[in-house]
């Protein structure tokens, strides 16, 4: 059980809470493939998604996670809602709260937006990604995938490569993996990775090959053009030559290393297509685990 109303960030969770979510997610995963195991445990509970930024994986997997447990699921449809008439974030959330919604899943371009809503509504609020702050459910599905593949976090070397400064995924992963006992290294171009990112507990390196050498887990990240003004590298071709991960770079990692990416992936930019489609990649498993982790989170928050 999680003794909290909301899930806003990995920074707030302790190791017991993270492991509770991961263990329940492993049970939930069986229900994705085997419909006979599904029960309507959350029947009469309602879920609404409010996505002020685009999404495929997070939004649909929350929908499916709710539906697989019998929840009533709906989407605000921000583009066609009264948000377009100027209604504020908090007024929108309070309006939905008064309709009796039990759980609000929010993605917003502003860091802190889900936290602001959580203070103003009775419903449970889940952060589905806020600005450059956190993406806790992505990190939890990443932890689940690492746990499945490696069996433990203690002493694992996890290297995260890419646009770290603009990445809520990098921040949530670093906060959680450090608590779980892993060593985290951030690597990338100086324009996309500031020394200040060491506050997350991660080591900062600017040579990708050196950062990947001996790693147990290598995670690529997309360049988040939607959160920057450009001018951070000369061209995509040069970026991929210097900072992209291909089979030669990945060969420097541990012989049992796995390749991860939160996706969407820009093939041929941060990761080479051959590597994405190779046996070291667990990107598809991350997607499936995303549904399982979100089922577990909904169950734990709704039954508290
Ligand atoms: N990884 C992730 O958050 O993907 P979406 O933007 O498709 O939800």
Image (cartoon, grey):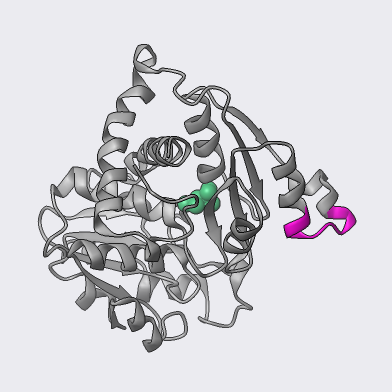
Q: Residue at x 36, y 62 (%)?
A: 220
Residue 137 higher or lower than 251, as above or below: above
The boundaries of the magenta stretch are 84-91
- Whether the magenta-drawn stretch holds residue 89 is answered as yes
Q: How many marks?
A: 0
- Residue 287 at x, y = what percent? 40, 41
Describe residue 286's horizontal placement relative to residue 43 as left or right. Answer: left
Closer to the camera, 214 or 227?
227
Left or right: 147, with 116 as reference point: left
Residue 198 image offset from top left, x and y in percent: 33, 83
Q: Magenta segment, principal secondary structure?
A: helix
Q: Quadrant of residue 284?
A: top left
Asked whether 269 falls inside the magenta stretch, the response is no
- Residue 64: x and y in percent read 51, 30
Residue under the point 29% across and 36% down: 24
Q: Who's the residue at 58% across and 69% down the image?
A: 111
């Amino acid at each position: 059980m999680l003794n909290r109303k909301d899930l806003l960030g990995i920074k707030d969770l302790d190791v017991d809470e993270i492991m509770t979510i991961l263990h329940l997610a492993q049970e939930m995963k069986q229900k994705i493939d085997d419909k006979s195991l599904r029960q309507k445990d959350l029947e009469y509970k309602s879920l609404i998604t409010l996505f002020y930024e685009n999404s495929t994986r997070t939004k649909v997997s929350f929908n499916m996670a709710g539906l697989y447990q019998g929840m009533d699921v709906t989407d605000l449809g921000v583009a066609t809602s009264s948000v377009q008439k100027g209604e504020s974030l908090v007024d929108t959330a309070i309006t939905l709260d008064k309709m009796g919604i039990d759980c609000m899943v929010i993605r917003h371009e502003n860091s802190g937006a889900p936290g602001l809503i959580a203070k103003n509504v009775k419903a449970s609020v889940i952060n589905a990604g806020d600005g450059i702050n956190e993406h806790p459910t992505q990190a939890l599905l990443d932890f689940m995938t690492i746990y499945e593949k490696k069996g433990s976090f203690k002493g694992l070397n996890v290297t995260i490569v890419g646009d770290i400064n603009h990445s809520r995924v990098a921040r949530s992963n670093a906060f959680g993996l450090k608590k779980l006992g892993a060593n985290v290294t951030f690597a990338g171009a100086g324009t996309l990775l500031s020394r200040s990112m060491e506050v997350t507990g991660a080591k900062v390196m600017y040579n990708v090959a050196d950062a990947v050498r001996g790693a147990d887990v290598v995670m690529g990240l997309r360049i988040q053009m939607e959160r920057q003004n450009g001018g951070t590298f000369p061209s995509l071709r040069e970026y991929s030559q210097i900072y992209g991960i291909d089979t030669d770079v990945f060969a420097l990692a541990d012989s049992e290393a796995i390749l991860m990416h939160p996706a969407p992936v820009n093939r041929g930019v941060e990761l080479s297509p051959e590597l994405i489609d190779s046996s070291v990649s667990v990107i598809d498993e991350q997607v499936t685990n995303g549904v399982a982790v979100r089922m577990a989170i909904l169950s734990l928050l709704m039954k508290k």
